[in-house]
Image: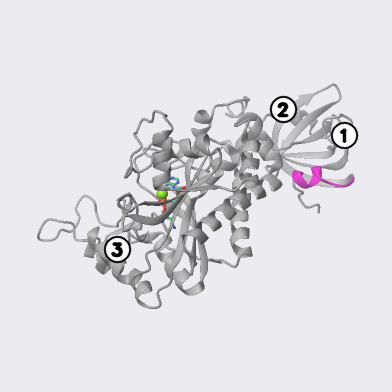
């Protein structure tokens, strides 16, 4: 019995092979007098393999009816191709048809819009562009693990269900098994969450960081890589309600170690994709972003700019550029500011650090000026914020004071404070938005097209 070979491997074969078996979907078919050319793709590579089906095949009358999208198994010989377009083709001995795709198969035409393809997200991975995107997504995940594992970071699985709010931005999806039509009530009329599944209010996590910190304060260097959820009602090209985040956390590290790690990681990932997904990147360069490879090469070849938040505001004020939202000390930077800095001013990624404490989360280390925190954001051309991170506040009393200022329910975070009580250490980490990294390496402009089944406000099909 022949085993199925991936088309990717056949196209890279060193010599012809007498007997091969491939399985895939018909891309196109052309008939001539005595035979048909059938282009088959199996998803292992962008390229199709050409199959020659002679009219002597027993089911040739069925083969002639094959349509785009039909599924087949082909056995035959891998031979050198007579036509100049490809090195090899398969001379079929048999073609078994699993299923034909009727005329209403939606992927007949070339050049379908991304908007249309989003309405058939269950079929779009069969197109060249989305096949390429999701092969890149797989390789990028693998490269992330390689990067951290080769540096001795331990992979930690942090929970998705939580009673904590890491970012304190109130953007959490509530999880409950209470009857929403008739929830149990306290005497004061509020919902009695002691009757809920966990005996308290629970949500989907916005970040694995708080749990990750506990493991860094035991195992040294750790990273997480998993889904996170945000009920941000913002319909933008770079926000999704469900997205994947990579969160490294390092014990005995400060903000500068953190910036070094972020920069090393981004450059490593870009280089890995350039080396291992060259065909797919060519497609993105041709059909999505003509400057893609130049942008990526620029990231690999140059170090990132590094400035403080105060310097960033000054640069924008002096630039003479009209921003929709005026740059002033204290503002939370908008996408237009982030993009200006990376794309127009520095023309490469830039790391901005030391933000005013008022616009950042409770856990960030207060700097000696008493005004700013040791936060860092990595901003990149086209996208803006790619990474957000910080050195963590490791002083028990300073952290407690900050939590109280923010009126946090401190009793709920006793476990978190314990890490500062028992053998506290300086530590730092960051979060990389995985889909934004996908946007960076593929040039894809909308986050909805970088994740298989996107979840955004008013949209949870498939
Ligand atoms: O800057 P953020 O909110 O940082 C944190 O969550 C920290 N707890 C991370 C840490 O220090 N361990 O989010 C980190 C990154 C952002 O820079 C962005 O790339 C991405 O996550 N991100 C989103 N990506 C897609 N859709 C959204 N709604 C996102 N919100 C954040
Ligand atoms: Mg952020």
Closest to the camera, between mark 2 and mark 3, is 3
Q: Determine crowd level at label 3: few under 14, some 14-19, many 20+ residues with C-alpha closer than 10 A.
A: few
Residue where numbered disc 3 is placed:
197
- Seen as rendered, the residue at the extreme top is 33
Give whichever of discs 2 and 1 has the lower sequence position: 2
Disc 2 to disc 3, C-alpha distance? 56 Å
Q: Which residues are magenta?
A: 7-15
- Quadrant in which residue 363 is drawn: bottom left
Q: Determine crowd level at label 2: few under 14, some 14-19, many 20+ residues with C-alpha closer than 10 A.
A: few
Q: Is residue 415 left or right of residue 54?
A: left
Give whichever of discs 1 and 3 has the lower sequence position: 1
Relative height, residue 394 to residue 377 (above, below): below
Q: Does residue 100 appear in the picture of this structure?
A: no
Q: Nearer the viewer, residue 140 or 160?
A: 140
Q: Nearer the viewer, residue 441 or 455?
A: 441
Disc 1 to disc 3, C-alpha distance? 64 Å
Give whichever of discs 2 and 3 has the lower sequence position: 2
The picture places residue 182, in percent across and down from the top left corner, at: 19, 53
Q: Is residue 268 magenta?
A: no
Residue where numbered disc 1 is placed:
81
Q: Is residue 62 left or right of residue 158?
A: right
Q: Is mark 2 within 8 Å of ligand 1?
A: no
Residue where numbered disc 2 is placed:
65
Assess whether mark 3 and mark 1 are in contact (beta carbons under 8 angstroms): no
The picture places residue 371, in percent across and down from the top left corner, at: 31, 55
Q: Secondary structure at mark 3?
A: loop
Q: Determine crowd level at label 1: few under 14, some 14-19, many 20+ residues with C-alpha closer than 10 A.
A: some
The picture places residue 192, in percent across and down from the top left corner, at: 19, 61
Q: Secondary structure at mark 2?
A: loop
């Amino acid at each position: 019995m022949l085993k199925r070979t991936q088309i990717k491997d056949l196209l890279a074969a060193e010599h012809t092979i007498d007997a091969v078996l491939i399985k895939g979907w018909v891309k196109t078919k052309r008939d001539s007098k005595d035979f048909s050319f059938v282009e088959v793709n199996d998803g292992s590579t962008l390229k199709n393999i050409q199959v020659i089906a002679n009219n002597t095949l027993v089911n040739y009358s069925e083969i002639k009816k094959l349509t785009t999208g039909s599924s087949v198994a082909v056995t035959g010989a891998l031979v050198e191709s007579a036509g100049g377009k490809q090195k090899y083709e398969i001379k079929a001995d048999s073609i078994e048809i699993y299923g034909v795709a009727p005329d209403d198969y939606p992927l007949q035409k070339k050049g379908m819009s991304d908007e249309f393809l989003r309405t058939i997200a269950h079929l779009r991975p069969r197109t060249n562009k989305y096949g390429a995107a999701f092969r890149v997504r797989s390789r990028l995940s693998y490269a992330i693990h390689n990067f951290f594992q080769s540096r001795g970071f331990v992979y930690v699985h942090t929970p998705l269900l939580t009673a904590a709010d890491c970012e304190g931005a109130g953007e959490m999806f509530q999880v409950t098994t209470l009857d929403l039509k008739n929830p149990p009530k306290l005497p004061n009329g509020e919902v009695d969450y002691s009757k809920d599944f966990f005996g308290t209010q629970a949500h989907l996590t916005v970040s694995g960081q708080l749990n990750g910190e506990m493991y860094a304060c035991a195992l040294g260097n750790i990273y997480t890589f998993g889904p996170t959820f945000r009920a941000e009602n913002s319909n933008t090209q770079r926000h999704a309600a469900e997205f994947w985040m990579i969160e490294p956390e390092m014990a005995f590290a400060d903000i500068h170690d953190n910036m070094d790690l972020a920069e090393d990681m981004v450059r490593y990932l870009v280089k890995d994709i350039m080396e291992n997904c060259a065909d797919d990147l060519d497609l993105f360069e041709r059909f999505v972003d003509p400057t893609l490879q130049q942008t990526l090469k620029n990231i690999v070849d140059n170090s990132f700019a590094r400035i403080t938040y105060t310097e960033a505001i000054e640069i924008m004020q002096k630039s003479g550029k009209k921003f929709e939202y005026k740059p002033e000390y204290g503002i939370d930077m908008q996408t237009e500011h982030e993009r200006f800095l990376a794309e127009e001013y520095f023309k490469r990624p830039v790391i901005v650090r030391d933000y005013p404490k008022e616009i950042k989360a409770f856990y960030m280390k207060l700097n000696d000026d008493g005004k700013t925190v040791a936060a860092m954001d990595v901003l990149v051309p086209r996208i803006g914020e790619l990474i957000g991170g910080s050195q963590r506040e490791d002083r028990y009393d300073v952290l407690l004071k900050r939590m109280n200022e923010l009126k946090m329910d401190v009793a709920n975070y006793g476990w978190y404070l314990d890490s500062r009580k028992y053998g506290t250490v300086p530590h730092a980490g960051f979060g990389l938005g995985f889909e934004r990294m996908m946007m960076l390496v593929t040039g894809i402009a909308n986050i909805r097209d970088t994740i298989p089944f996107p979840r955004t406000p008013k949209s949870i099909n498939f």
